[in-house]
Amino acid sequence: VTVEVPDRAACAALDAADPLAHCRDRFVLPRGLVYLDGNSLGALPRAVRAAVDSVIDHEWGHDLIASWDDNGWWDAPVVVGDVLAPLLGAGPGQVVVCDSTSVNVAKQVEVALTMRPGRDTIVTEIGNFPTDRYLVDAIAARRGARVVAVPRAEVVEAMGERPAVVVLTHVDYRTGEVHDLRAVTEAAHAAGALTLWDLSHSAGAVPLALDDDGADLAVGCGYKYLNGGPGAPAYVYVAARHQVDLPSPLPGWVGHADPFAMEDAYRPADGVRRLLVGTPPILALAAFGAALSVFHGVAMADLRAKSLALTDLFIDLVEARELPVTLATPRDHHRRGSQVSLRHPAAPEVMDRLIAAGVVGDIRPPDILRFGFAPLYVRYVDVWDAADALATILTTGRP
Ligand SMILES: *Cc1c(COP(=O)(O)O)cnc(C)c1O
């Protein structure tokens, strides 16, 4: 099959007409680098440095401990959570920024099992992100629950197992395949189960509508498409309707109704705040909060349209050159996240050479070359250059 593909000049014209082109200036990006790994570590937003400097100079460096109240440190997890919420399709009061994704998965699995007494099954998918699997398995073992792990295509069928909770990653980290969040959630509800969605590879690049889709619980990562920085705090979402009797999975003092009363017994804070455990990481929250400003004025529909255009372009360019790779990412727009994965038996060597040529993606074992397309800073010419570099490597003998 021969595909009609644009040349580099046509890609430059696409950039010139791109309604999101100006957003690239909101990031610090090394000159000459094609960065297609924003799904693993998002680029540095320019606004981060000033925000962190300000906390250091004026708050920590001057106001010291008064900052917990005067500079809003105590409320930062919920304030940043409410800034993030629209990117998840969530109304206010349902998202807090805290801990790591791994810890949040553990907390939310505990929440779900406690909210469904009398049920002892967790449904998840084979090939789910390792931390999600390890934690589900460990919590199930500790609580005497059962894990039913099925292939992606059989998740809805597995609702017949009467699960307490269905734990899934919305966008598969290997292939970029997207679950139909609404349909799976509806199937789970019809079976009396809760859903726990891991949004690590979705938020910031793939539109989400947690409230409208009826989601129950969710978690996700702050340092991928959300650009919160290495080890950025993660987030949890709890639908408002579940917050009244929300269990406290790890009842630390920061999730207490009145932490400074220093009471002997735990009393839960209202709402999603009770998922907080310990003292919030203020410098990291300042960085994350500032990082979210890159989404100001960006329509999700534009973001999604550009993401699909970039991934379409990359797929077309690779196919037009008839390169010896197999597409692992769905072609169907409804099933594709913001990445393109290509299988090649020598993936590690190919990626080493690509990185040496200034095109940064990554690999996932055994044979996946993974390219993430962050729509706010990846250009059409970057896609063209990446495909060109890949073609050069794959058609010049080595490896
Ligand atoms: C990146 C990622 C994580 C990361 O978890 P950490 O606790 O931040 O290390 C978890 N789940 C998924 C699906 C991810 O893609």
Image: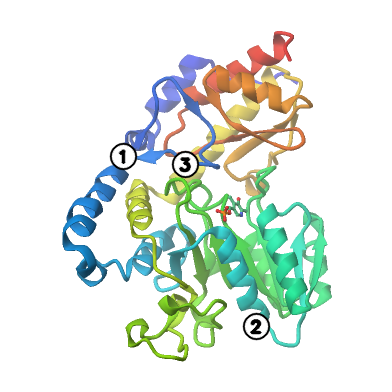
Vertical arrangement, residue 317 with respect to residue 341, above or below: above
| Colour pattern | rainbow
Q: Which residue is mark 1?
A: 46
Q: Residues within 10 Å of mark 2 (few under 14, many from 20)?
A: some
Give the spatial CA distance, label 1 vs label 2: 42 Å
Q: Which residue is mark 3?
A: 42
Give x and y (percent) for residue 79. 34, 66
- At label 3, the amino acid type is Gly
Query: Is residue 215 visible to us here?
Result: no
For numbered disc 2, what is the local secondary structure?
A: helix
State the residue in front, 177 or 71: 71
Give x and y (percent) for residue 169. 65, 57
**Is 332 displayed left or right of 302 in the figure?**
right
State the residue in front, 114 or 20: 114
**Contact? badges 3 and 1 (CB < 8 Å):** no
Residue 114: numbered disc: 2
Vertical arrangement, residue 53 with respect to residue 375, above or below: below
- At label 2, the amino acid type is Thr
Question: Looking at the image, is mark 3 or mark 2 earlier in the sequence?
Answer: 3
**Is 121 displayed left or right of 238 in the figure?**
right
Q: Is mark 2 within 8 Å of ligand 1?
A: no
